[in-house]
Amino acid sequence: MVSFNDMKKPAGRSISDESIYYACFKTLSVPLLRRAGIACTASIFFNFFFRQYRAALLPGRAPVTRVDHQLDAKIPFNPRLVGVYLDFVSFWVRMLSFLLRKFRRRAYAPVRDFLDSMGRLYAFAAEIYSENFSTTRRPFYIARPRFFLIHLADPHLMCVPSLHVMVVIRTYTKFRSMLRDMNEEERLPERIEELRRGSLAITEAVLYVKQHSVNCISAAMYAMTCFDRGLFPPEEAERFASDLFRGTGRPSGGDGERIREHILGLYRRFLDEGERAAYWTEPLLSFLRGLPAVTAVHSPRV
């Protein structure tokens, strides 16, 4: 099992050592970044929080589908990884801190473009949510304060595609692209690998804390290929899924292989259907409409 906080850090200053506050300060104080930062934040709040709470408080506007898969039971509930799961926003903000600290003004334009793309990413995923919400069976566990906050703040209606996975994939692939554009890629391979491994750790964590199903991972990978095929082509998606659950721990080797095969098989199915579809959302919406519907969407056990 890969743990983002416990894995061996590469030599030199790691991105995980950065503070999120530096990126926030620079974004607010630099006019070139401020507008992009505000627009990105607005998109996140509207497309993630507002849409979910409106659906929970005013049910019936869009169908809600349960997207669990039997392989989810092979992944044990591990509440210790809630910190890794919740790190997904700080994960990309620390990446921006690293770029702004190391490259200063050179990083302004790339950081602005990243913020623009993150806002568009949330709106892109919402093209599915606006038509069909989705959920999974998650345990009602509040022994740790962070889980209490999750149940309190997250109506748990945006599972397909997983925004957690989309965001971390965007973070490591865009970081590599930004370094390439600045002719710095060959100087910082350790930082690129650090972010890729962190993305894998967070993706595993969303399954270990039972916030998503294995189906949600395939959907997120497909969405990212549609969003930016140049940065996340099928070859990169294959590599990403093939590296999940390669560490020690559970699930066992056999179960881990079945999980990887399912994630990749469903991703390939979505990709194949998407090639013949009029619009990228059609394979995911068709998949959701073929699964059981949910009637009550506001229970904390959903």
Image: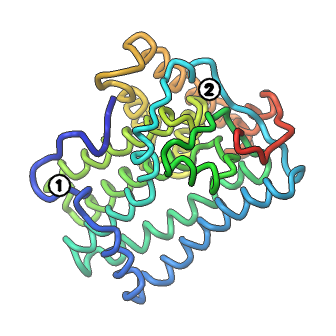
Q: Give the residue type at disc 2.
A: Arg
Q: Is residue 284 left or right of residue 88?
A: right
Compare residues 261 and 55 and report the one nearer the observer: 55
- The quarter of the rendered structure image containing the C terminus is top right
In the image, residue 278 above or below residue 74: below
Label 1 packing within 10 angstroms: few (<14), some (14-19), many (20+): few
Quarter where residue 282 is shown: top right
Residue at the farthest top position: 254
Taking the spot 39% from the left edge, 29% from the top edge, the residue there is: 244
Total numbered circles: 2
Where does label 2 land, which residue? 269
* Numbered circle sitting on residue 102: none
Compare residues 54 and 115 and report the one nearer the observer: 54
Q: Is residue 278 visible?
A: yes
Taking the spot 39% from the left edge, 60% from the top edge, the residue there is: 90
Q: Is residue 125 left or right of residue 23?
A: right
Q: Tell me where residue 50 appears, x and y as whole percent.
A: 71, 64
* Numbered circle sitting on residue 188: 1
Q: Is residue 168 left or right of residue 143?
A: left
The kind of secondary structure element at disc 1 is loop
Residue at the farthest front position: 143
Q: Tell me where residue 162 appears, x and y as whole percent.
A: 58, 44
Residue at the farthest left position: 11
The kind of secondary structure element at disc 2 is helix
Taking the spot 52% from the left edge, 39% from the top edge, the residue there is: 221
Mark nearer the N terminus (1 vs 2): 1
Q: Give the residue type at disc 1.
A: Leu
Q: Tell me where residue 187 appears, x and y as whole percent.
A: 13, 56
